[in-house]
Image (cartoon, grey):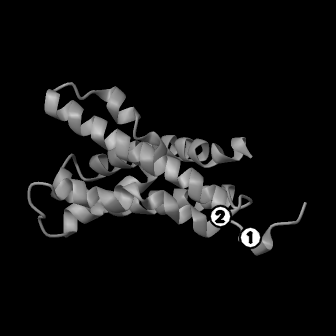
Amino acid sequence: MQREYGRLPLVCLCAGLVGRILNYAAALLMLRLAGGRVDTAQDLYLAVSLAISLTLIVTVGVAVRRLDRKTLLFSASLLVVYGILTLILEQAAQLFGFYNGFVSLLWLPVEIFQPVTSLLMRYCADLGRYGNLLYALPALFGPYLFALFGKSAKQQPSS
């Protein structure tokens, strides 16, 4: 049972890595197609990024569908706590001026939820000084979506 708690974070880590590679490739391709004009490619990139994210979320959900909802909720809670701690570390790194690629790599397990934050930041009203943190909330709690893919207690085979 203990190993099952680590399955969702591990699958999310792999999906985050795949998502980052696909997003970098998409960004390069779109910039090339737009002749290097970022403003032209920005909305298209956001749409592609959201499509990649949604595809990866469904793929991860299918990969963990054999787990029961209780296990998925616990695993999702681990990811949520990890995301919150990573956000705190990122904000502290920016505040003290030592933000680097390593901090960016820490986001990989929850990377597939980040396009939601980008979408909110792009199309919602400015929320003031702490708006960026508020925009991050849906992405931070996104791992709980995976509980929808799990088996209910009624579907569990009796031992």
The secondary element bearing badge 1 is classed as helix
Residue position marked by numbered label 1 in the rendering: 153
Category of crowding for the residue at label 2, using alpha-carbon neighbours closer than 10 angstroms: few (below 14), some (14–19), many (at least 20):
some
Q: Position of residue 154 (x, y in %)?
A: 77, 75
Task: Look at the numbered discs 1 and 2 and tell me whether their residues touch, using CB distance below 8 Å.
Answer: yes
Residue at 23% over, 54% down:
133
Residue 78 spot, x, y in % from top left: 51, 47
Labels in figure, total:
2
The image's mark for residue 29 is none
Q: Residue furthest top?
A: 98
Q: Quadrant of the C terminus?
A: bottom right
Q: Please give left or right for residue 53 compared with residue 85 in the image.
A: right
* Residue closer to the observer: 150 or 56: 150
Residue identified by numbered label 2: 69
Q: Residue at x 53, y 56 (%)?
A: 56
- Residue type at the position of mark 2: Arg
Q: Residue at x 29, y 56 (%)?
A: 136
